[in-house]
Image (spheres, rainbow, N blue to C red):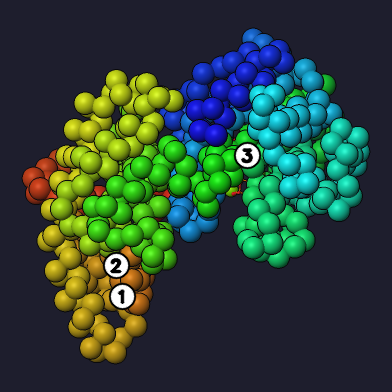
Amino acid sequence: MQTAEIQRRWLTFFGDRGHTVVPSASLVSDDPALLFTVAGMVPFIPYFTGVVPAPFPRATSVQKCIRTLDIEEVGKTTRHGTFFQMNGNFSFGDYFKEQAIAYAWELLTMSEADGGLGFAEKDLWVTVYEDDEEAIGFWKKVAGLPDERIQRLGRADNYWSTGLPGPAGPCSEIYFDRGPQYGPDGGPAVDDTRYIEIWNLVFMQYLITNVRSKIDFDIVGELPKKNIDTGMGMERVAFLKQGVDNMYEIDQVRPVLDLAARMSGRRYGAVHDDDVRMRVIADHVRSSLMLMTDGVSPSNEGRGYILRRLMRRVVRAMRLLGVDAPSFAELFDASRVAMREAYPEVEAEYERTSRLAMAEEEVFLRTLASGTTILDLAVADTKKAGAQSLSGDTAFLLHDTFGFPIDLTLEIADEAGLAVDRASFDTLMAEQRARAKADAKSKKAGLADLSVYSDFRALGETVFTGYDYLETESRIL
Ligand code: ATP
Ligand code: MG
Ligand code: MG
Ligand code: MG
């Protein structure tokens, strides 16, 4: 079942059941607290919080999402993309828990011939919030699930809130059991590799206050109008339905992976580390293409910095596969072809986005060429001296003179089995900032930096700003 077919079945199912079909919003979120759209519900936040009255009682969408919070998981787990599509059905004070459970069960287990997703009932497990007896009751009543396939989890796993006073409520997640060859028995509470989370149902039921953390708050009472927010991972359903091992092997992603394999002359499935790199390339190329299509350009801060980091990781992964030559022209083109049916805007914007991608690659390859030689020498010297970590001086020199971003230095050092003296690097950076400030003050103007690497100079300072931004992504879902 192709991804486009899953999308069609989803929208038809909920459309037929009175849901207004809402097109995907941009990856660039309207919510100022979020860098990106991280979940299907993001465009509907004003309706859920009651700031704006919902124009329809129920809605459904297939939403483009970016979660860079999951970046370290990409290619290592089977199920985490930085870009993915979340299929949602939403009720704004209309239907609630029983109906949401009934819809999910019906769509998952209805036969393919009847328009459903055709999962076998025996392969599905659910988790519920520990004291949500109501949900347990409905899972038994509606789905006939036996006790042993309904597991209770605590707030950290199965409670949704924005982390702010307002609506909150218990969740119930649906998992697919891939079978004993993938891990131990015992259900999703025990293992998340064998039991793959495919769908999260959020029952927005309570008003919370005194929010001390995402899991520590006081419940004021029941919401007058209870809401439903659900999210099903379309790539996860696609890889399970397509009989492949992971989400990077689905129809919308695999062509880029295969191309990376061909370009490097290495076979996918032969060496684990190479496989991870090919999956990272396929994922990040798609994310970058989709971000640029939605108007993000590589830069040194905010959204643009995250895009830049994704693109650099592609370059790095290609080099680790032995490809030093420019490769974005081909990789992005393969992703364009795989994504254009679902997102015609990818085609419409391609002249602009491909130009951007190739320019970004060219600058980064130049940066890499100059810095790598220095770094290789420093790594060799450090090892010869029997030290465990690269000096802060070296990291600073690379940053300051060669425009080499610290995250890259960390990554390359790590591959060589070395740490980096981060504390001394940070001190040198702070001293440099203080000097620059004093300098700018005395000259009453900022100094123009005309070096070809000037755009990378600022990166060391914004790396962690990037991650601070990322933290806010976890605020939703
Ligand atoms: P996981 O525990 O596997 O990281 P999650 O609990 O963080 O998933 P939710 O926030 O509940 O995910 O999102 C709703 C659904 O979106 C999930 O059930 C899953 O199917 C899908 N999903 C979430 N994150 C990703 C991702 N990074 N890549 C692909 N699909 C995802
Ligand atoms: Mg997650
Ligand atoms: Mg989860
Ligand atoms: Mg979840």
Corner quadrant of residue 265: bottom left
Is residue 240 left or right of 427 when viewed as pictured? right
| Residue 208 horizontal/vertical position (percent) | 76, 36
Is residue 186 in sight in this rendering? yes
- Mark 3 Cβ and ligand 1 under 8 Å apart: yes
Q: Is residue 452 above or below residue 373?
A: above
Q: Is residue 325 above or below residue 414?
A: above
Which one is earlier in the sequence, the residue at label 1 or at label 3?
Answer: 1
Corner quadrant of residue 48: top right
| Mark-to-mark CA distance, 2 and 1 | 6 Å
- Amino acid type for the residue under numbered disc 3: Leu
Give neighbour class at mark 2: few <14, some 14-19, many 20+ (Cα, 10 Å): some
Corner quadrant of residue 109: top right
Q: Residue at x 84, y 29 (%)?
A: 98
| Mark-to-mark CA distance, 3 and 2 | 33 Å
The residue at the far front in this view is 113
Question: Which residue is tagged 1?
Answer: 416
Q: Is residue 155 above or below residue 432?
A: above
| Residue 136 horizontal/vertical position (percent) | 87, 41
| Mark-to-mark CA distance, 1 and 3 | 37 Å
Near-viewer residue (83 or 211): 83
Disc ID at residue 477: 3
- Kindly check if marks 2 and 1 are in contact, taking CB atoms under 8 A apart as contact: yes
Q: Residue at x 62, y 57 (%)?
A: 193
| Residue 179 horizontal/vertical position (percent) | 68, 57
- Amino acid type for the residue under numbered disc 2: Ile
Near-viewer residue (332 or 376): 332
Give neighbour class at mark 1: few <14, some 14-19, many 20+ (Cα, 10 Å): few
- Amino acid type for the residue under numbered disc 1: Ala
Question: Which residue is tagged 2?
Answer: 412
